[in-house]
Amino acid sequence: MGRTRVVALAGNPNVGKTTLFNALTGMRQHVGNWPGVTVEKKEGKFTYKGETFLVVDLPGTYSLTAHSIDEIITRNFLLNSKPDVVVNVVDVTALMRNLYLTFEILEMGLKNVIIALNKFDLAEKKGIKVDPKRMAEVLGVPVVPISAKSGEGLEELKEAIARMARGELKCEPVLPTYDRAVEREIEHISRVLEGTDLAKRYSVRWLAVKLLQRDDDVMKLVLRQLGKERLDEIMGHIGEVEERYGRSIDLVMASSRYEFIDSLLHRFVEYENVVITSFTDQLDRVLTHPVYGLIALAIVFYFVFKFVFALGMPLQSLLARAFSDLGNWLAPHITSDLLRGLIVQGIIGGVGTVLSFFPLVFLMFFALAVLEDTGYMARAALVLEDIMRKFGLSGKSFIPLILGFGCNVPAIMATRSIDDEKARLVTVLINSFIPCSARLSVISFITAVFFSSHRALVALSIYAIAVGVAFLMAWFLSRFVVRGERAPFVMELPEYAVPPWKTVVLHSWERSKEFIKKAGTVILGGAIFMWFLSNYPEPVGTGKSYAEAIGHFLAPYVSLMGLDWKAAVSLLFGVIAKENVIATYGVLYGSKAAIASAMGQLQAYVLAVVTTLYVPCIATMAAIRGEAGWRWMLFAVAYMIAVASLVGILIWHVGTWL
Amino acid sequence: MSLLDDVLRLVREGHHTAAEIAAELGVSREEVEGAVRLLESMGYVEVRRLEKEKNPCSSCPLRKVCRFSRGRGESTPGG
């Protein structure tokens, strides 16, 4: 028996490479990692007419420019491991982009390539008629039409592999030609490299093409071979050619390759004028539209809040009653007044009130996870991004802002992807206005306790105010600090899908369990401290408690927004963690009914908006300090208090006037 | 003008989805996605992906002292 022949499978991502690998090798597979990296390496064997072949499934790539680890692995394997046969899996329904990679492979000087023309069965449905025989003649590469999924054409492919490995099948590929100036430079570099050791290992034309593209790895190879002076001379020439084009030479060459492929395609492909618009594309026309998309966004989020309150409120009431009953049951069993007050009023009153809102928090995360997994969130982000640009924000700001709805801390960290330092600063400074999940519980609490109807609309309006303030501040800061740069971008929109319900529930639980953990730590501590302040040296109501002293000190300021001293104390504690606003009311009033009598709807609305907008929590402050320094952190605290106060005063006065 | 140039021009003009660009050029979305990926690898366009937030605590400056951090005790690959 002869030696085992090595067959490499190369191709774009999602062309059916792995399906072909499985179809060829069956159960004879081994999965490991590529040396030194955590990229999966799949190998498997098949036997054909007594010969054994080892198939290596290379990572899917769009090109071999060596910018990503997948590209490097594929390129190095093809160049250095010298497989006996390279099977380039090509998706017949997207020939242009697939053949781009094909020609990159062929430019390496490989003469053992077979094109496996996959999804051949789908081509006709899409109005694409390919003549594989003609394609093979035009490209100079053997072409085997297959359907990896149904197994059609696999025997022919195995036969072609076996013949190629034995040297019975020829591969004399046609190679892309570039503009005259580029070709002249390729010739010049090729002449310099001919006769060197490098020329024994690699195609000199490929080396020249890669040098023109300023490929780091090839530049290092040439540096070692020719020395710095010669390399500088070559790169100097390349610079001159580039100057003539007025744009980067790699773009000139990539564009030429596309033109070259286009000129070949007409010789073996016929496109019927069949335009298939997928369901995703049709829906996207509405959901990513600048106007309809925004209306859809408002409607979707209205129903999200509607769902959260409709389902969450009965559960919240049940939990609140359970905590209240627990307090009532425990009270007679505790003889010490001090301990009874601490447990019933402080812990159960404070933490219990916060915990009773867990169903709403969970349902909100659930709804958001559903939106994420259906693919809608990416569309919502795109619609918001369009508005952000209008407010002068950097295009790169929108991912950190979207992250802010979960937690502002990682969102502020994510601003590191923004290259422009001033644009980054603006994004850091406005991020804390985006209502995080902690503020969601406060918004839910206030909406649920003080509003008996239109809760979804109330919650949505608070979110809208917060996002509106963030955009206005972005406009203000970017107008006076920096104008956002316009980096061209494309948003990757996933196909719409039915969410995997189990994952959605697990994901929602993962996110919302932090709320319970927090209730058992920071909020518990805050509630106990609040209980202490409201009972010492004398209980609340005597006017001699510490809480009243602090509250009355701040009262003149919050009264401008129609709020009382209790709101002032709750806002003060909310600095540690926003949920402490709820805990404070729980400690001070004890029950939901009592809290509901504490203030009117307008005051409650003001409190919710101010809680959403005023100072960031301690963790977010630390994040701002880490990213922008003390000065900007203090600035953020001061300007957020100022903005929250202004908005609070405005809502109160306009609301009173109305 | 190649498809690559056309795609780059449209992205620069403010078209932000492959479907939009494909409709404009009368080619398939898959072809546009290929061109976009290539332009991304060459550094001409940015492709934005809304990735799921896995662990918000991993980037928090307080994670080492925070009692309820999910990432406490985990070290970075560098150390």
Image (cartoon, coloured by chain):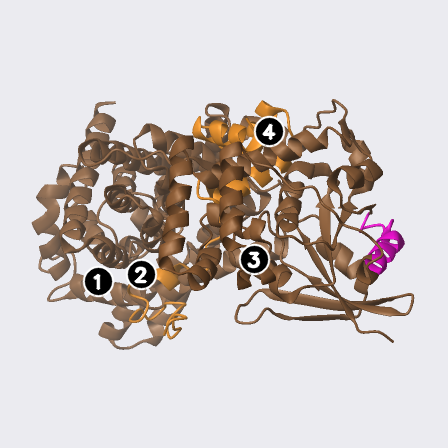
Give a yes or no on whether discs 1 and 4 share a subunit. no
| Horizontal and vertical percent position of residue A246 | 39, 31
In whole angstroms, how far apart are the C-alphas of marks 2 and 4? Answer: 56 Å
The question of residue A419 being in magenta is answered with no
| Horizontal and vertical percent position of residue A135 | 78, 38
| Horizontal and vertical percent position of residue A450 | 34, 41
Q: Which of A282 and A358 is in front in this view?
A: A282
Which range is magenta? A147-163
Q: In this view, does A463 lie above or below A199?
A: above
Callout 1: chain: A
Callout 4: chain: B
Q: Name the residue under label 2.
A: A350
Q: Mark 4 points at which residue?
A: B22
The circle drawn on residue A70 is 3
Q: Which of marks 1 and 4 is in front?
A: 4
Q: Mark 1 points at which residue?
A: A530
